[in-house]
Image (tube, helix red, strand yellow):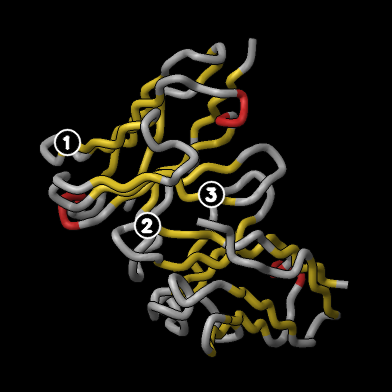
Amino acid sequence: QSALTQPRSVSGSPGQSVTISCTGTSSDVGGYNYVSWYQQHPGQAPKLMIYDVNKRPSGVPDRFSGSKSGNTASLAISGLQAEDEADYYCCSYAGSYSYVFGTGTTVTVL
Amino acid sequence: EVQMLESGGGLVQPGGSLRLSCAASGFTFSNYVVSWVRQAPGKGLEWVSSISSRGDSTYYADSVKGRFSISRDNSKNTLYLQMNSLRTEDTAVYYCAVLHGSAGYWGQGTLVTVSS
């Protein structure tokens, strides 16, 4: 049950694109197509941005997209906006109703 | 409107016990696997425990196994977390959440502080 590995921080200017990686193992990220991504602003509960690797819940802008290759999932944010500045966490199903979260990435809009 | 409202947090001494509740509304609670997730101050998210939709299967992170117990009452749309033998490292905001699929339901969290 080790946390998934994410970069500590990424940054970009408004309008640019950033990508956050999330590396696990064949027992979690690589074993299931159940990777989700959460956005968390300070003092708030996490908000679902991507589920099942690459699906967006209703209301989430299409600037957010997800993908997966092997044991690594990725979240891409295009057309970066000021309100995208937040912490982002990946989460993978790990079998038997267990889950594992990533270490978290702080996105800074320069 | 979907709501998940946690309660029961507070200050407890090491070795003590606490019972958290999560009242759900606005969706068919009994259809979902629900989980507890915690976040220590200034730290990341950590999955704690999950329970099947009917409540007949439970799962725990190694860090809480044997000390925490998850349960649910579908007639009351309520999720519970019984926490025993609490340690200082259990200090965190505890969230109830639906982690699978497109639901993305989360509560606002309840703070548990374990300190002497």
| Between marks 1 and 3 in the image, the one whose residue lies nearer the viewer | 3
Tell me which chain the residue with mark 3 is part of.
Answer: B
Secondary structure under the numbered disc 3 in the rendered image: strand
Residue position for label 1: B73
Q: Taking the image as drawn, is residue A58 in sight?
A: no
Q: CA distance from mark 2 to mark 1?
A: 21 Å
Q: Amino acid at mark 3?
A: Glu
Relative depth, front residue between A105 and A85: A105
Residue drawn at the location 23% of the way across and 56% of the way down: B32
Q: Which mark is residue A98?
A: 2
Question: Residue B86's spot in the image, x, y percent?
Answer: 50, 22
Q: Secondary structure at mark 2?
A: loop
Instruction: Please determine if labels 2 and 3 lie on a single subunit.
Output: no
Kindly identify the residue that appears in the image at 71 percent across and 64 percent down: A105
Q: Nearer the viewer, residue B62 or B23?
A: B62
Q: How many angstroms separate mark 1 from mark 3 (CA)? A: 24 Å
> Eyeballing the image, is B27 above or below B41?
below
Residue B12: percent from left, percent from top = 53, 14
* Left/right of residue B58 with respect to residue A62 in the rendered view: left
* Residue type marked 1: Asp
The circle on residue B46 is: 3
Mark 3 crowd level (few <14, some 14–19, many ≥20, 10 Å Cα): many
Q: Indicate whether B47 appears above or below B113.
A: below
The quarter of the image holding the C terminus of chain A is bottom right
Q: Is residue A78 left or right of residue A51?
A: right
For the residues labelled 2 and 3, the Cα–Cα distance comes to 11 Å
Q: Residue at position x 42%, y 16% from top?
A: B17
Mark 1 packing: few (<14 Cα in 10 Å), some, or many (20+)?
Answer: some
